[in-house]
């Protein structure tokens, strides 16, 4: 069947089977492989995307359930944030340069403040959980702009990381929260 949905601000009309999972549509049909698949059973959270602004696990949602909705993946997060006029964070402005930076091109890569904070705080090692962690963190910060450690741990309870021990992830979310508040304050003063 044919469905229409918006993905990262672009309207797509795609042919899917009724059983096609949203994660498979994103990865296999549209090449958006930043959305990872770990468990396929709604436990690890690495497939987290935003559906109409809220974090969902795309491995346990049918593509047809997203028909008519707006989906945001890790590939579109920075642009979506910029479009809300909260501004980009330059990876160069974080304390640590990351391999994300396009050094060959001599340009800083524009990223969401949560992405910049994850790089700056060493909140990732293998990176497999990271897209889902970042999408879940962005949703958490939408609901709790100044979260406590407990709110972060609770908000990310559906996202598992086998590498980091979570300490630096919590640190990164707090750093991103502070940065986003600074950006918001600067813009409201303009
Ligand atoms: S792959 Fe979706 S929760 Fe693990
Ligand atoms: S950084 Fe490896 S699973 Fe989280």
Image (tube, rainbow, N blue to C red):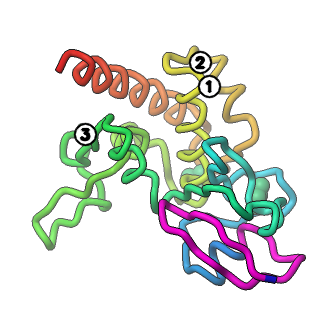
Q: Marks 3 and 2, how far apart in space? A: 22 Å
Provide the residue designation for mark 3: 94
Secondary element under disc 1, as helix, strand or loop, is helix
Up-down relation of residue 14 to residue 183 (above or below):
below
Q: Earlier in the sequence, mark 3 or mark 2?
A: 3
Secondary element under disc 3, as helix, strand or loop, is loop
Magenta includes 21?
Answer: yes
Q: Mark 1 and mark 3 in contact (Cβ < 8 Å)? A: no
Provide the residue designation for mark 1: 152
Q: Earlier in the sequence, mark 3 or mark 1?
A: 3
Q: At x 68% / y 30%, what residue is drawn? A: 155
- Residue 43 location, x and y as percent? 82, 50
Q: Marks 2 and 1, how far apart in space? A: 5 Å
Provide the residue designation for mark 2: 149
Q: At x 67% / y 81%, what residue is drawn? A: 14
Q: Residues within 10 Å of mark 3 (few under 14, many from 20)?
A: some
Magenta includes 4?
Answer: yes
Stretch of the chain drawn in magenta: 2-24
Q: Toward the viewer: 143 or 124?
A: 143
Q: At x 25% / y 48%, what residue is drawn? A: 91
Up-down relation of residue 94 to residue 11 (above or below):
above
Q: At x 60% / y 25%, what residue is drawn? A: 143
Give the number of marks: 3
Report the quarter where the N terminus lies.
bottom right
Q: Horizontally, is 158 left or right of 107 in the view?
A: right
Q: Mark 1 and mark 2 in contact (Cβ < 8 Å)? A: yes
Q: Residues within 10 Å of mark 2 (few under 14, many from 20)?
A: some
Secondary element under disc 2, as helix, strand or loop, is helix
């Amino acid at each position: 069947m044919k469905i229409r949905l918006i993905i990262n601000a672009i309207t797509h009309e795609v042919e899917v089977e009724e059983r096609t999972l949203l994660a498979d549509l994103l990865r296999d049909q549209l090449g958006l492989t930043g959305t990872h698949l770990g468990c396929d059973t709604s436990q690890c959270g690495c497939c987290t995307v935003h559906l109409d602004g809220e974090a969902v696990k795309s491995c346990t949602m049918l593509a047809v359930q997203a028909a008519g909705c707006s989906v945001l993946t890790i590939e579109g997060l920075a642009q979506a944030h910029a479009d809300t006029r909260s501004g980009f964070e330059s990876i160069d402005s974080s304390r640590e340069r990351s391999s994300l930076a396009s050094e060959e091109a001599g340009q800083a890569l524009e990223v969401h403040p949560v992405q910049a904070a994850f790089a700056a705080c060493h909140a990732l090692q293998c990176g497999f959980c990271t897209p889902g962690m970042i999408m879940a963190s962005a949703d958490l910060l939408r609901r709790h702009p100044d979260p406590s450690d407990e709110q972060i741990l609770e908000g990310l309870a559906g996202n598992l990381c086998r590498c980091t021990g979570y300490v630096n992830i919590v640190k990164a979310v707090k750093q991103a929260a502070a940065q986003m508040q600074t950006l918001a304050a600067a813009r409201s003063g303009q």
